[in-house]
Image: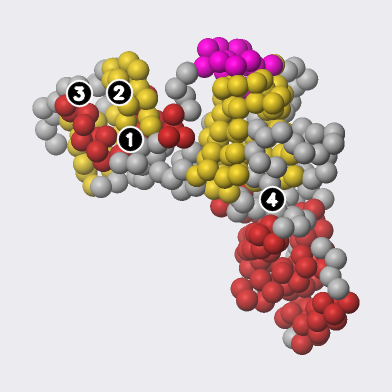
C-alpha cells in the first residue's frame, strides 16, 4: 500500500474528532448528526482536510484482508467504535509514516482490542459466553458477525473455552494466526504463536488445523497437540497435561532443562533473562508462582548448583555456582 502524496501530520484532537465522525456516520447517523458533522467540517479548513483523509483511509483499510485492516472497523458496540476511532486517528496523525507502520506486527499488537503486558494475564468473557484467557504479552482481536466468530491472535498465547452459540444455525468459531487457523469443534484448547509456527493443544472436544498456504488439514483430539506452519498442519503429539496451568498463575517444570525454563520464565519478566550454556542442561522440577519472578529466581540456587547474577534489575544471568563477575 502506497502513502498518498503530500500528506503531512495533523493535530491530534482534530484527527480524533474526524475519526469519531467517520465511524458515527458509518454506523448510520441521524439527520441531526449528519448536519452536525457537516457543520464541523465547514468550521475549519483543517477539519475538512482531516475528514477527507479519514474517509480515504477508512475506505482503503476496509478493502484490505481482515488481518491487515483496522481490527475494530465497522464494529457496532460503543467500545468497538472507540477503538476503531483511536486506530484511525493514530494513522491520521502519523501520516505518511503511519501508512508504513500499520503493516508492522507491533502496530497491530498495540491496537488489538484485548492485550496483556509482559507478566500480565487476563480472563475475558465474550459476547457469546466464550471464555478467553490471555497469557503474558498477548494480543487478540475479536470479530463476530452473523456468520462466524473469529479471534485473531496477533501475539502470545490464549486459552479458548468455547460456548454454545445461540445463533441458528450456530456460527463456527475459529482462531486465526499468521500461520493459519484453528477451527473449534465444541472445545477447550490453547494456542501459542511463535515466530515460525503456532502450537495448538486440545483440552476437550476437537480442533481442526488449517494452514494458511495449504489444503491439508489435521484434526486434534483431547490430549493432543501439534505445531503448524503456513504450509504444514504438523503431526499429532501428546500434549502436556499441565500446559494450561499458566491460567492459574503457575509455571510447572518437570525435569525441564534450565535453558528452557529460563526461556519460559523470560516471557513473564520484563528485561533480559539469560542462561549460561554451561548450566543450560541442568534439570529442574517444581511448581512456580509466576506473579513473583524475583522469588522464582531467588529459589533456584537452593534447588540446583547455580547462581543468579544481577547486572541490573532488568538484566539477569543464570551462571554456574561460584562464578566470579
Q: Are marks 2 and 3 in contact (CB under 8 Å)?
A: yes
Does residue 152 appear in the picture of this structure? Answer: no
How packed mark 3 is, by other alpha carbons closer than 10 Å (few <14, some 14-19, many 20 or more), is few
Q: Position of residue 125 (x, y in %)?
A: 60, 44
Q: Are marks 2 and 1 in contact (CB under 8 Å)?
A: no
Q: Secondary structure at mark 1?
A: strand
Q: Are marks 4 and 3 in contact (CB under 8 Å)?
A: no
Residue position for label 4: 71
Q: Which mark is residue 286?
A: 2
Looking at the rendered image, the disc whose residue lies closer to the viewer, 4 or 2, is 2
Sequence-first disc among 1 and 3? 1
- What distance separates the C-alpha of mark 4 from that of mark 2? 40 Å
Residue at 40% over, 43% down: 119
Sequence-first disc among 4 and 2? 4
Query: Which residue is farthest right?
Result: 31
Looking at the rendered image, the disc whose residue lies closer to the viewer, 1 or 4, is 1
Question: Per the image, is 231 magenta?
Answer: yes
Q: Position of residue 253 (x, y in %)?
A: 35, 22
Q: Is 237 placed above or below 190 here?
A: above
Q: Quadrant of residue 320?
A: top left
- What distance separates the C-alpha of mark 1 from that of mark 4? 34 Å
Amino acid at each position: 500500500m502506497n502513502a498518498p502524496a503530500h500528506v503531512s501530520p495533523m493535530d491530534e484532537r482534530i484527527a480524533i474528532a474526524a475519526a469519531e465522525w467517520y465511524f458515527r456516520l458509518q454506523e448510520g447517523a441521524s439527520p441531526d448528526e449528519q448536519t452536525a458533522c457537516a457543520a464541523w467540517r465547514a468550521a475549519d479548513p483543517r477539519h475538512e482536510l482531516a475528514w477527507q483523509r479519514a474517509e480515504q483511509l477508512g475506505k482503503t483499510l476496509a478493502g484490505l484482508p481482515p488481518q491487515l485492516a483496522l481490527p475494530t472497523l465497522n464494529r457496532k458496540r460503543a467500545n468497538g467504535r472507540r477503538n476503531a476511532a483511536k486506530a484511525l486517528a493514530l494513522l491520521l496523525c502519523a501520516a505518511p509514516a503511519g501508512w508504513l507502520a500499520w503493516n508492522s506486527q507491533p502496530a497491530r499488537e498495540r491496537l488489538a482490542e484485548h492485550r496483556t503486558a509482559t507478566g500480565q494475564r487476563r480472563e475475558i468473557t465474550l459476547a457469546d459466553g466464550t471464555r478467553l484467557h490471555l497469557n503474558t504479552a498477548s494480543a487478540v482481536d475479536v470479530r463476530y458477525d452473523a456468520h462466524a466468530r473469529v479471534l485473531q491472535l496477533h501475539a502470545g498465547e490464549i486459552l479458548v473455552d468455547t460456548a454454545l452459540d445461540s445463533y441458528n444455525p450456530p456460527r463456527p468459531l475459529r482462531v486465526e494466526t499468521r500461520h493459519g487457523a484453528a477451527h473449534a469443534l465444541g472445545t477447550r484448547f490453547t494456542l501459542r504463536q511463535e515466530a515460525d509456527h503456532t502450537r495448538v493443544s486440545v483440552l476437550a472436544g476437537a480442533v481442526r488445523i488449517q494452514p494458511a498456504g495449504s489444503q491439508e488439514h489435521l484434526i486434534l483430539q483431547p490430549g493432543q497437540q501439534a505445531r503448524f506452519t503456513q504450509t504444514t498442519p504438523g503431526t499429532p503429539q501428546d500434549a502436556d497435561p499441565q500446559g494450561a496451568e499458566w491460567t492459574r498463575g503457575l509455571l510447572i517444570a518437570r525435569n525441564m532443562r534450565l535453558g528452557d525454563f529460563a526461556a519460559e520464565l523470560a516471557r513473564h519478566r520484563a528485561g533480559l533473562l539469560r542462561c549460561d550454556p554451561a548450566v543450560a542442561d541442568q534439570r529442574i522440577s517444581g511448581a512456580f508462582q509466576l506473579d513473583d519472578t524475583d522469588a522464582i529466581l531467588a529459589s533456584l540456587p537452593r534447588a540446583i548448583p547455580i547462581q543468579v547474577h544481577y547486572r541490573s534489575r532488568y538484566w539477569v544471568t543464570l551462571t554456574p555456582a561460584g562464578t566470579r563477575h
